[in-house]
Image: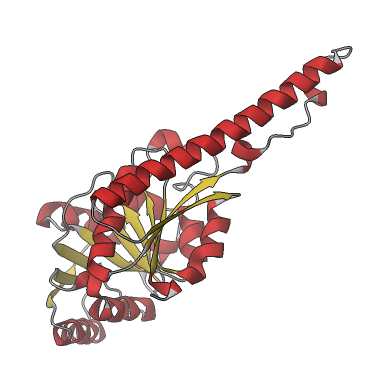
Amino acid sequence: MTATQKIVAFIDGSIYAESVCHHAAWIAARTAAAVELVHVLGPRDTSGKRDHSGAIALGARTALLQELAELDAQRSKLMSHKGRAILDDARAILDQDGVADITTRLRHGGVVEAVAELDPEARLIILGKRGEDADLAKGHLGSNLERIIRTSTRPVFVAARAFKPITRVLVAYDGGASAMKAVDHIARSPLFQGLSIHVVTVGTASPALEKGLGNAQAMLKAAGLAATTSVLPGQPETALADLVETQGFDMLVMGAYGHSRIRSLVIGSTTTAMIRACKVPVVLMR
């Protein structure tokens, strides 16, 4: 098995961690890929040595500074233990789901930097969405989602809050290069075999767009996939989420870069809001 066949799943102590594990197991079962579980300890979790001198009143005893430094070291050690425990629990979930090839990694630093480091080894990056409270904390995956999408050259799978079987996939198509690359990836990947695929364009139909949709459908059908197409009026950030909800799609796939309103959506400030609006996993492809 080559390194690029590895699914790299980022987990933490959030409510999304279990969903990330189940989605990783589902992908592994369909692709025969290994899974690496990664937990990132940020600088605040690992900084056992801090300068407390500026926070201590004049005349404070040296012993107090020493005690604070020791407490910091203990906190750093506890956070490392917590990280290991999270990884152990995640491994147990994957093991129960039937995944045989599992590795774990406790990494220090930032999530975006971890993605950049592990990207060459991955065939897919998977992480969870975040709730409002978590977004208030700097450094969480939710607040870094756009940076992660920009950093990774691999597909980024953003897991929903809860796992459910995936049978129907919606593909957002804007006619751009990354949209066709996404369609090509779907056609070649064992992940999508046996799933129902619907390719949709949000906006106004044109001959060029209709031709592109036809080519996408033909490519998917040639790969043995059940594929349909449509053109949907409206704005991508609302129309896609509404279509997912009303038509019962289980997953949304989008090209990370294009040349239309979908491009501004994916690389703009509404990215995280749109992904959260969809109550299903979202896969972003470069």
Which residue lies most toward the front here? 100
- Which quadrant of the structure image shows residue 227? bottom left
Q: Is residue 140 above or below residue 145?
A: above
Picture quarter with the N terminus: bottom left
Question: In the image, 177: left or right of 215?
Answer: right
User: Residue at coordinates 31% horizontally, 67% vertically from top-left?
Assistant: 254
The residue positioned 29% from the left and 46% from the top of the image is 93
- The quadrant where residue 56 appears: top right
Does residue 261 appear anywhere in the picture?
no
Instruction: Indicate left or right for 276 with 83 as reference.
Output: left
Looking at the picture, tell me which residue is in the foreground, 174 or 99. Answer: 99
In the image, residue 186 lies at what x, y percent? Answer: 26, 75
Return the residue nearer the eye: 179 or 220: 220
| Residue at 33%, 50% in the rendered image | 20
Q: Residue furthest right?
A: 59
Q: Can residue 15 be seen here?
A: yes
Q: Is residue 262 left or right of residue 193?
A: right
Residue 51, placed above or below residue 269: above
Return the residue nearer the eye: 201 or 199: 199
Q: Residue at x 52, y 36 (%)?
A: 81
- The one of 209 and 213 positioned closer to us in this rendering: 213
Residue 67 horizontal/vertical position (percent):
74, 19
* Residue 177 position in % (x across, y down): 37, 81
- Please tell me how many numbered marks the rendered image carries: 0
Residue 234 % position (x, y)? 23, 61
28 left or right, relative to 57: left
Name the quarter where the C terminus is drawn: bottom left
